[in-house]
Amino acid sequence: MFRQCFFQLIFLGLSYTLCAQGTRLRPSSSKVTAIEHYTLSNGLAANCIGQGFIDTKGRLWFNPCRDAAREFRLSFFQYDGTQSFFYELRPDWLSEQAMAPVLYLLGETSNGFLFGADRENKFLFYWHPETREQHFVKLKQGEVLLNMDSDENGEILVLTLNQANETYFVTNLTDESRKGINIKLDFAGDFIPNTPSQFAYPFEVTSNKAYFFHQRKGLVQFDRKLQKISYTPWSDYSNILPVLTNYLDVPVPRESATQI
């Protein structure tokens, strides 16, 4: 039997854990927890869950794990503890006969939009569960999604990579022109740490700046107003031993890198 804990909730100061074919922790007066299983019989859409979060309305959203999403063509879904709810989002350029795309979520904006991408790395989207307003943006040829994040103003920034010339892009998804900044990093003579073979790209956005960790450069930072780039090398961080490598820095797409 497959069993994987995937999510922890902090609610009213108490801790809960949900698992696919796994557990829910029930609080007691002494904060000692008891365990209850959630499976398909409890209305969970999939036993294999990759990622989840609670939105500002208190709703629970989950992405099926990569294998389940591909085998059963499952997109993200909402779960209320007894049943799962799916929402079909379809770009205008898809014909009615075409199969609906398989989508996954990466977060929520301050104004309630959920955002994410399709699992074939073809387009990005943001969608509002209440108004059902939806927007889709195609990725360019050779452009690979690494991560997305939203700032406090509700703008969604996208970190992508052009694998052909190893150029990184940070663009604003909520701007139709997707204006942004190109980040061309020089790797000559770089020392890098022993990072995992599949390196994920943490991405953090504020109103003025955006940051991401790069496998060879360390912390890359750019100023959104001044359009300037700087970075803090791995050697500036303690307890990280650098090693010299000579392989190309071409990461796998985010979907396979993090196995959402």
Image (cartoon, rainbow, N blue to C red):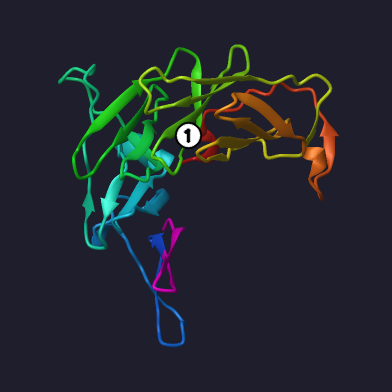
80 relative to 14 in the view: left or right: left
- Quadrant assignment, res 3: bottom left
Q: Residue at x 38, y 31 (%)?
A: 117
Q: Quadrant of the C terminus?
A: top left
Q: Residue 45 location, x and y as percent? A: 28, 51
Above or below, comparing residue 63 to residue 146 in the picture: below
Q: Determine the main secondary structure of the stretch shown in magenta.
A: strand
Which residue appears at 64% of the width and 25% of the height? 228
Q: Does the magenta portion include 203?
A: no
Q: Which residue is mark 1?
A: 255
Q: Is residue 107 left or right of residue 127?
A: right
Work out which quarter of the rendered image holds the N terminus and state it: bottom left
Is residue 11 rendered magenta in the image?
yes
Outermost residue, bottom direction? 29
Foreground: 200 or 19? 200
The foreground one among 125 and 42 is 125
Residue at 39% across, 53% down? 53
- The x, y position of residue 142, in whole percent, is 50, 14
Q: For the magenta stretch, what is the residue range?
A: 1-17
Give the percent coordinates (x, y) of residue 25: 41, 73
Q: Amino acid at mark 1?
A: Glu
Residue 67, picture quadrant: top left
